[in-house]
Each structure stands twice: as structure tokens, then as C-alpha cells.
Image (cartoon, rainbow, N blue to C red):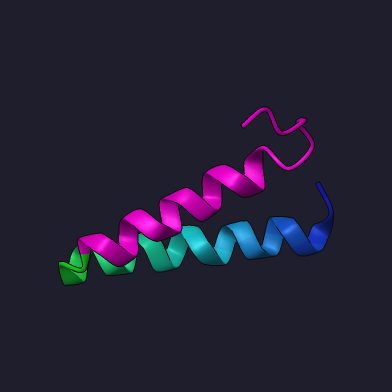
Amino acid sequence: MSDELKELERRLIKDQKREQENGDDKLAEGIMVALFEIEHLSEDYTG
């Protein structure tokens, strides 16, 4: 994973935690989906 993606992942994790604390579950869930996608970028899409 590139340094840029690692930084993006770090920022998204921070944002996701903040949104959970603020009670915005929809946004927190959306960020979790984005984190999942980032973690699986190198895998082939089988959808």
C-alpha cells in the first residue's frame, strides 16, 4: 500500500471514530465501507 493510501486510511479511521462518537451511524458505516474497499484494492473484483 502506498504512503498516500496509508495516510488516507489513517484519516478515515479517525473520521469514522469521530462520527461514531457524534452519533452519525450512517456516515460512520459509509466510512467503514470505504476502508474495506481500500484494504481490498489489490484483489480482483468478483461481483
Residue 9, percent across and down?
60, 57
35 lies left or right of 27: right
Residue 32, percent across and down?
43, 51
How many numbered circles does the render carry?
0
Residue 6, percent across and down?
71, 55
The image quadrant of residue 20 is bottom left
**Which residue lies most toward the front here?**
47
Residue 36 is covered by the magenta coloring: yes
The image quadrant of residue 10 is bottom right
Q: Residue at x 65, y 64 (%)?
A: 8
Q: Residue at x 71, y 33 (%)?
A: 45
26 lies left or right of 45: left
- The span picked out in magenta is 25-47
**Which residue lies most toward the left here?**
23
> Does 22 sit above or below residue 29?
below
Residue 34, percent across and down?
53, 54
The image quadrant of residue 16 is bottom left
Mainly helix, strand or loop, the magenta region?
helix
> Does 42 sit above or below residue 18?
above
Where, quadrant-wise, is the C terminus in this rendering?
Answer: top right
22 lies left or right of 15: left
Residue 44 is covered by the magenta coloring: yes
21 lies left or right of 30: left
**Which residue lies most toward the right here?**
2
